[in-house]
Structures are given as structure tokens and as C-alpha cells.
Amino acid sequence: MQLSSEELLPVSREVAWQALNDPEILGACIPGCESIIASGENEYEVQVSASIGPVKAKFKGKMRLTDIRPPESYTIQFEGQGGAAGHAKGSAQVRLEVAGEGKSRLLYGANAQVGGKIAQIGSRLIDMAAQKMAADFFAAFNARFQSNGSPPEADRPSEARPAAHPDSFWQRLRAWLRGILGG
């Protein structure tokens, strides 16, 4: 499977770079992401629940950033196992460009190989699921930024705030639900 596209971001290249390197922000934006945990320098353990057509699975895998050129580009190497549903392995090249004052353009290209039940679904359905996941990611990512072009205080990259407790995402979610439900 190959996927490439570009996205206009409502923030400067430097702010986008910081956000794209913050596991907490990424975890909140990646559809179905249950966790992203640093396991080494530029290496992460990732757990994502995904549905591709009739196949639903929880993928556990590894993600590694290579060819890092701040604040311009990096390559993501990834691999994951989804049990009986199958496996995936691939890479994505990510590049940020300045796109006017306070804006940036993210360009990406990804290659992935899948196996198991997922591969039996058919490339067209897999491509549609990947495109939907990318669209959902960018909708969530862009929504995290205020009109002034910076992330809300709770979402500032970790360099700009004290280290978050591992449960902070779940604590914010519970607080949000309590606010909605009046409890």
C-alpha cells in the first residue's frame, strides 16, 4: 500500500514540529491510539485499535524516527502485530515546509506491507481505511490549535510544560466526561 498527501497546518513549522514530536499530542490525535510510550531515543511502543472493513484488531508495535532534520523532516519506521488479524510493516517520510506567516505544510508519503486477514480484505478497502485514518488524524491535530496558532495550555509540547503523568490523557477524558454528564 502506498499513500501520499499534504496538509496545510494552522501553525508555524516550529510549532508543528514540536507537536509532531510530542507522544501525548500524537496519542490524542491518532485514531484508535491507546498508548505511545517512549522505549528509547526516538523509539516508541505503540498500541492502536483499528477496523479495516470487517476486521477489527488491536495492534501492538514499534515506531522509530530516523533521518531526523529538525524542524524540516524525519522518517518513521513502523511494524505491528494484530494477532489473528495480521501484521503491518512500513515507513513514512514526513516533511514540513513554511506556508506563509504562522502556517506550515506537511507533506508525507507512506509505504506499508500487510499480511494475514487484513491482506485478504483487498487493497482498495485498506487504502480507504488508511485515507480515513489520515483525515481523522489531521482533523484532530488541527483542532488542537487555537486561533492564535499555539496549542492549548494542556496540549503544549512536553518541553514547554512539566512532564505529564502517564494517566494524564485519561484524567482529562474523565474530567471532560464528568463535565458533560454533570458528575
Image: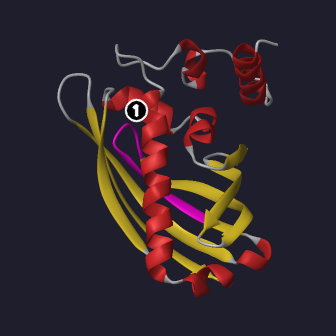
Magenta residues span 69-78
Whether residue 104 can be seen here:
yes
Q: Is residue 35 magenta?
A: no
- State the image quarter where residue 102 is shown: top left
Answer left or right for 96 relative to 60. left
User: Which residue carries the number 1 mark?
Assistant: 16
Q: Is residue 74 magenta?
A: yes
118 is higher (above) or lower (below) than 82: below
Q: Foreground: 53 or 64? A: 53
Residue lying at 61% horizontally and 36% vertically, measured from the top left: 28
Q: Residue at x 37, y 37 (%)?
A: 71
**Rendered location of residue 183, percent (x, y):** 82, 13
- The residue located at (51%, 16%) in the rendering is 152
Q: Is 144 on the left or on the right of 174, as rendered?
A: left
Residue 162 in picture, x, y percent from top left: 68, 15
In this image, 133 relative to 71: left or right?
right
Disc 1: CA contacts within 10 A as few (<14), some (14-19) or many (>=20): many
